Amino acid sequence: MGLEFYAVNAFANSPHSGSQAAVVVVPHDDARWTDETYLQAVAGDFAWPATVFVSPMKNEGESSSGGKPKTPKYAIRWFTKAGELPLCGHGTCAAAHVLLPLHGAERIAFEHAGSGEIVATKEEGGRIGISMPITPATVSPDERQDLRKDLTVATGLEASDVGAHYTVTILTQAVRVKEGMVEIRSRVFIPSMGLDEDTITGSAHAVLTGYYLSANGGGRSTIERLVRDPDDERPASVKPSTVVLDAVQLSARGGSMRCSLVDGRAQLVGRAYLMGKGTLNDDFGC
């Protein structure tokens, strides 16, 4: 039986922008779910920033004792044409955009073997919100300086900082700080996964949410340091928990989202558009 797939543009400013994802639905207990050769081949055929495989978990669709449907729960995996990803925000947003209306649900949970549970919700204006784990940028001060020099030469942009997250290089700049809102711009490069420059990257913005809004070592967050004199020890007038990042990724297709810190996780909210659907062919006549 051929698998159903959906073509989605996620974290998009308009229908033909944002990051492309193919969402492929694999039935529960289907052997193809664990056939990594097959999954990688399908991702290679799409050759989009992400091919997302979702499969309903055993209790999906059951009702609680009160008669209300439980939150639908799906296992999820993300692939590029070059390999499997440990985390993918735009792919999760795309999967939620497909599955939420199919279930008539307000929220859906995805379970990943490495990244744990990611909950997606319907938000105001038809947007999708996803709750992502925050992974700190793992780059030393010396490496940061070298990366910053190389990338500013390559791109012509000035950057406030550079972070690296499982072979992801992030170039970011806060362009405007207003009460309750910080406008940030970024570019993201993932050549090791076949994405020389990514379109709009949810996992990178989970890192950026932590970078801008989380306090490091009990000190001030980056946003508090941006709006205050570094020698001023008085309590900051801006509370990171009340700040929203208005994030734009400066790729060729472009994309955007809003990011906030909620219960220690990055809440990413953006639009997605369903571009089409079909069925994968399993009968090639050979």
Image (spheres, rainbow, N blue to C red):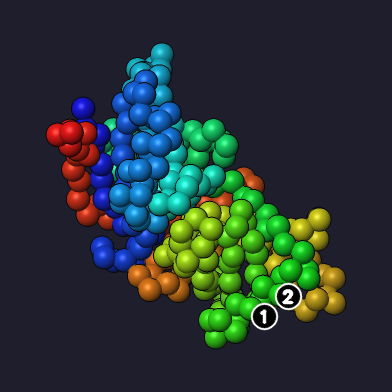
User: Residue 62's mark?
Assistant: none
Residue 161 on image: x %, y %: 66, 72
The amino acid type, in three-letter code, at marker 1 is Lys
- Measured as percent of width and height from the top left, residue 181 is found at 54, 69
Q: How many marks?
A: 2
Quarter occupied by the C terminus: top left
| Other residues around mark 1 within 10 Å, as few (<14) / some (14–19) / many (≥20) | some
Instruction: Give the residue at x 40% y 37%.
Output: 37
Mark seen at residue 149: 1
Name the residue that disc number 2 marks: 145
Q: Position of residue 142 (x, y in %)?
A: 78, 71
- Tell me what residue is drawn at x 48 percent, y 44 percent: 84
Residue 194 visible to the viewer: yes
Q: Nearer the viewer, residue 188 or 74?
A: 188
Residue 53 relative to residue 275: left or right: right
Residue at x-position 22% and y-position 39%: 280
Q: Are marks 2 and 1 in contact (CB under 8 Å)?
A: yes
Give the secondary structure at mark 2. helix
Q: How many angstroms separate mark 2 from mark 1 (CA)?
A: 6 Å
Q: Which of 154 and 243 lies nearest the eye of the viewer?
A: 154
Quarter-of-image position of residue 198: bottom left
Quadrant for residue 141, please give it: bottom right
Circle 2: residue type = Gln
Where disc 1 sits, the SS reads helix
Residue at 47% in and 47% down: 83
Apparent side of residue 125 relative to residue 192 in the rendered image (left or right): left
Q: Please, is residue 73 above or below residue 191 in the view?
A: above
